[in-house]
Amino acid sequence: MAQQHLDPTNPLAGPAPTGDALAGYLRAQATEFLRALRLHRETGSGANGSEGSAEAARALRRSARRISAGLHTFQPLLDPDWCESMRPELAWVSGTLAMEHAYTARLERLLTALHRLSGSTALPGQAAGAVAAGRAEAPAGARADAAAGGRAAAAASVPQRAAARDAGLRNPPPAAPERGNLTVGAAKAGALLDRQLTLARTRAHSTALQALGSSRFHAVADKVAVLASEVPLSRAAGSTDLRPLADAARGRLTDAVSALPLVTAGSPYNAAALVHGLSPDTVPHPQDAPWHQVRLLLRLHRYAREAVNGPQGNAVVDLRLLSAGRALNRHRDASEAAAAAAQAARTPRIAPATAYALGVLHADQRHEVEAARFAFQQCWQKETVRTS
């Protein structure tokens, strides 16, 4: 069976959308960009940004991605010089604003995984901190009493200690669970990851604030403001059908998916995602790049369908693409989390238990990569059968 569409919408049905529909779509996205920018300025931002400011940043990223995708897919209908100058700037805005959220989500993902792997009752990094805080907050008298108690125990008579030793030989204490060492290492690994990713998040927040106040961003905002009222269409755009260009975006997605090892990904726990797992190279896994490319092409395809179908037809398309997009987002998040764990494991002079916990965490996230590939394969094959 030939693999056809992930989107079952018939491109030949209904009236042909032309450049006027594209202009309306771009104007709507530009208006959303300006509205989000105004909201961001009204809410302001503190050290870590308020909730309203974070939501405004997400809205800015969404509209910037959609405008950039529209310029990419439908560039033949737009002024080419304007598109070439605008797309990199929109990508810069979206990428800069996404970093703080990415570091926050990555830290939460890794700490949650450490908590699950260690079987502890508190998130890794909290247990060690609680112990240290308890020692620091203990009164001096209590510490002195504990020391005195220790000296009294050390002064116990020899017969008492011999009896205790004999009792211990007859009734040995239960062996400590094997996860004990991982729990200790997980606490230190969680603290290390928290320091590194919190620092990266703080720097990303400062970079985003500087970017939003820069002359470069103001120039982008001015161009988007012009786009909200005037779209630089070509002369032939008014009579050109948008659907062939949207269909070409779908074709690029289909070709990229056909190059993926879906047969291997269709078998769970095939260990393909763990290849090169012990490599000393710090570069990202080369096998992840095609999957990341498919994720971007899937987004371009979805945004192209939004422009073609209009507001009324977007719900059906998004529902059919939602599962595939979620699987690829999981793939990206797990891949980057595994890289963060590997980077933390390269920290000089860390304890062996910490390095071991980070290694287990890295393997866990690479298994998550494999699970996401399997989920995408299942979703893609299901949609292919439905539409062929």
Image: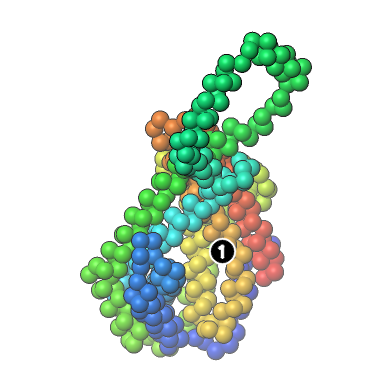
Residue 373 place in picture, x, y as percent: 60, 53
Q: Residues within 10 Å of mark 1 (few under 14, many from 20)?
A: many
Instruction: Identify the image quadrant of residue 383.
Output: bottom right
In front: 371, or 341? 341
Residue 112 place in picture, x, y as percent: 57, 50
Image quarter hosting the N terminus: bottom right
Q: Residue at x 63, y 35 (%)?
A: 179
* Residue type marked 1: Gly
Image quarter hosting the C terminus: bottom right
Check the image and report above or below for 20 versus 112: below
SS at mark 1 in the image: helix
Q: Residue at x 53, y 52 (%)?
A: 109
In front: 275, or 94? 94
What residue sits right under mark 1 in the picture? Answer: 325
Q: Is residue 144 visible?
A: yes
Residue 171 place in picture, x, y as percent: 76, 21
Residue 155 place in picture, x, y as percent: 57, 16
Image-based side of 310 in relation to 234, left or right: right
Check the image and report above or below for 277 versus 214: above
In the rendered image, the residue lying farthest to the right is: 170
Q: Residue at x 41, y 51 (%)?
A: 198
Q: Residue at x 33, y 75 (%)?
A: 41
